[in-house]
Image (spheres, rainbow, N blue to C red):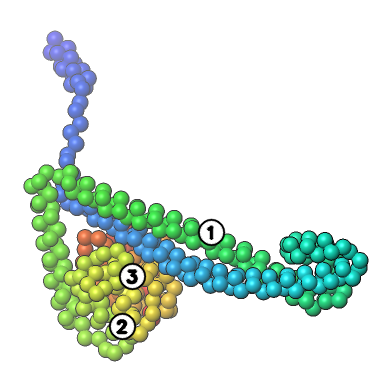
Amino acid sequence: MARKLLASLLVAVFLAPTTVVWAAPSTAQIQRKVDDLRTLAAEKFEAANEATLKIAQLEKERKGLSSKEALIKAELDSASTFLSRIAIQSYQGSGFSHSLELILSGDPTQYLSDASILEVIGSRNAKALRDYKATRQRYQASQLVLVDRTTNLVAQKAKLTKEVNAAKKALAEATKVLNSLKKEDREQLLREEADRENKIFADSKKYAQSYKGDNSRGSLALKFALAQIGDIYVWAAAGPTRWDCSGLTMRAFQKAGVSLPHSSRIQVKYGKSVSYSALKPGDLMFFGKPISHVSMYMGGGKMVQAPRPGKKVEVINITKMFGRKPFVGARRL
């Protein structure tokens, strides 16, 4: 009897419905989620910086090509007018009626494509004809290049819009996550974040004040970057009190007499490559695949940077993994 009762109890236990209790995410988990979203926004903003520079370059190229095309078009029109007169005179001398003159003078491009007319012109005005053909080829080539630049320009503008929208979406999601917390939990998280940032700021100030350096290019750039400790991160900002990562490095090296573009993905093409083990103060460090962050090595195992939305210019320990972004190379200018 006892055995039957025990068996019945075991069956009841195993067949009883189970309820899975999910623990609410901790404030630390929420903070990581918010930080990840803000870091994602910074990545998208850096991609937008690259697109912005390419747009500016393409706009400049297109403007120059348009001006060049207009000049070539003027040459082509002049050559067409000159050859049309020759063609008319040639046909009038062959006994054609005066009405043909009106036909020929109406559309020089059309009649100059006629092989028989070109043959007549060419027999007496070979040089003028060669010049005309060369000018027409240049004009057609310039049109093709202009179309190509315009197409690229449209694509880069679309990319810029896409990256900026993605960044804004990530920031909006971070705000949504924070707002989903209870008031007391949100206030606790914000207090903890403020305490952490205040400690980073205090430590960064000490590191900055301890740096002496010299008059080398890298040292001068580094001194400028360290003078910005505590300034807030703002996308596309390049001073005087707001910065994004590549805006800070751009202005720092401008202070040292080096011109850099406002994009980490393009800055990595400047200077010479340096290994992680051979870093010196002032070397630029790049992170991410594709590259989406740049910082500056200050020596002593530290680097200075403008990291992401919600953060300030700071000094932190160097690393081969900045969040989820791997170190991909360093450059010395």
Q: Picture coordinates of residue 324 (x, y %)?
A: 32, 58
Q: Picture coordinates of residue 24 (x, y %)?
A: 17, 41
Under mark 2, the amino acid is Lys
User: Which of the two residues, 236 or 294, is positioned nearer the viewer here?
Assistant: 236
User: Which of the two residues, 43 or 64, is positioned nearer the viewer here?
Assistant: 64
User: Which of the two residues, 295 or 119, is positioned nearer the viewer here?
Assistant: 119
**Mark 1 Cα shell of 10 Å, populated few (<14), some (14-19), many (≥20):** few
Query: Is residue 29 at least partly visible in the picture?
Result: no
Give the residue at the far front of this rendering. 98
The mark that comes first in sequence, 2 or 1, is 1
Q: CA distance from mark 3 to mark 1?
A: 27 Å
Q: Nearer the viewer, mark 3 or mark 1?
A: 1
User: Which of the two residues, 299 or 132, is positioned nearer the viewer here?
Assistant: 132
Mark 1: which secondary structure? helix
Residue beneath disc 2: 255
Residue beneath disc 1: 151
Under mark 3, the amino acid is Ser
Q: CA distance from mark 3 to mark 2?
A: 14 Å
Q: Decide if residue 107 is on the left or right side of residue 253.
A: right
Q: Decide if residue 121 is on the left or right side of residue 282.
A: right
Under mark 1, the amino acid is Thr
**Mark 3 Cα shell of 10 Å, populated few (<14), some (14-19), many (≥20):** many
Query: Is residue 172 at least partly visible in the picture?
Result: yes
Residue beneath disc 3: 246
Q: Are marks 3 and 1 in contact (CB under 8 Å)?
A: no
Compared to 132, does 3 lie above or below? above
Q: Quadrant of residue 119?
A: bottom right
Mark 3: which secondary structure? helix
Taking the spot 67% from the left edge, 74% from the top edge, the residue there is 75
Q: Looking at the figure, which quarter contains the N terminus?
A: top left
Taking the spot 62% from the left edge, 64% from the top edge, the residue there is 143
The mark that comes first in sequence, 3 or 1, is 1
